[in-house]
Image (cartoon, helix red, strand yellow):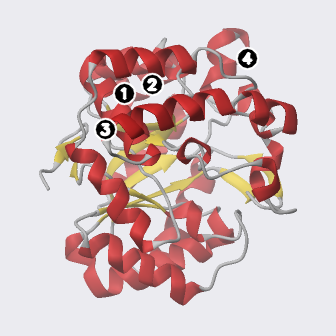
Amino acid sequence: MTAVQLGDGLKVSPIGFGGMALTPVYGGIEPEEGLQTLRHAVDAGITFIDTADVYGAGSNEELVGRLLKERRDEIQVATKFGIEGNPADGYTGVRGDAPYIRQTAEASLRRLDTDVIDLYYMHRRDLRVPIVETVEAMAELVREGKVRHLGLSEVTAEELRQANAVHPIAAVQSEWSIWSRDVELNVVPAAKELGVGFVPYSPLGRGFLTGTVSASDLGENDFRHKIPRFGDEALDANQAVVAAVREVASGLDATPAQVALAWLFTQGQRLGISVVPIPGTRKTHRIDENLGALSLQLGTAQLERLDHAAAAVVGSRSADPNWVSQGREANPATA
């Protein structure tokens, strides 16, 4: 596969792997099963592995560390700091102060069992700390050789501009998919303007856009229960967007997941920005399926069908809009 250049000279595979899927947030999983999935991803040509210190309370970084011990030279590893708590149990806070950043970076390096993190993200914005101070603390890690590139997750356009003035930002990571397009209004244009790449998380709508998720499929402890658009009534209404994805997929002899990913690649081209989605999965055959999206072409009529369906989506992508860039873009006073 041809590598894609994000920002600040960072080159990665055109599809990454989202490590959050290999944590208890979507139900229990055995570490050996997760490691086998990661190995298959690298065997298939995926070199960009994304994790975070909060995933599995550090256990996901440890799992990725086992992979790095075997194949470090083949991988660009991204991890994140800033969220306290656990996705499965509920977050307890956000921190972006310099002492905390240094502490968490050292802990992530230990768990990953590596000397350097290729891409280090601020996972969420700590509104108590000016973003320039947070990024300056991150930049110090680059100067020390512990981090190669910096990233930001769920920031507004203005936050991105302020951060990039302190140190080049390689990538913005935010939710972006057929049914989550709010970032296209302000954040994506700012990233294009600054030469920053975009890493969409949940590019398959947390599995919903694959057509395999219904209310009955969500276990009692499933993280998606906390998201408004996964409420019973919203989930039923949002089947319309799944129907559109299925319709397009049927006409192309493709799968819904491939159509959803191909839409993102096409949208990146339409908007003039490098896009590297990071779908996560527990099943190795899904990795091969996702990679098939790289050769899928969507025509004008198909894109119009998907765009029309996206406009009718019901429910927010976050229980707290200010937790993601969408809320702070809509209400700059909270930023």
Q: Is residue 260 left or right of residue 86?
A: left
| Residue type of the residue flagged with mark 3 | Leu
- Spatial CA distance of label 1 from label 2 is 6 Å
Determine crowd level at label 2: few under 14, some 14-19, many 20+ residues with C-alpha closer than 10 A. Answer: many
Tell me which residue sits at (57%, 63%) in the image: 21
- Res. 121 visible in picture: yes
Q: Which residue is disc 4 drawn over? A: 334
- What is the residue that sits farthest to the left in this orientation? 2
Question: SS of the residue at dot 1?
Answer: helix
Q: Is residue 209 left or right of residue 151?
A: right
Counting from the top left corner in percent of width and height, residue 280 is at 49, 59
- Spatial CA distance of label 4 from label 2 is 16 Å
| Residue type of the residue flagged with mark 4 | Thr
| Residue type of the residue flagged with mark 1 | Asn
Q: Which residue is disc 2 drawn over? A: 160
Question: SS of the residue at dot 4?
Answer: helix
Quadrant into which the N terminus falls? bottom left
Tell me which residue sits at (43%, 28%) in the image: 163
Q: Nearer the viewer, mark 2 or mark 3?
A: 3
- Res. 199 visible in picture: no
First in sequence: mark 4 or mark 3?
Answer: 3
Q: Is residue 223 above or below residue 195?
A: below
First in sequence: mark 4 or mark 2?
Answer: 2
Q: Which residue is disc 3 drawn over? A: 252
Is disc 1 in contact with disc 2, using a CB cutoff of under 8 Å?
A: yes
First in sequence: mark 3 or mark 1?
Answer: 1
Q: Quadrant of residue 298?
A: top left
- Spatial CA distance of label 2 from label 3 is 37 Å
Counting from the top left corner in percent of width and height, residue 233 is at 86, 32
Q: Looking at the image, which is closer to me, 13 or 162?
A: 13
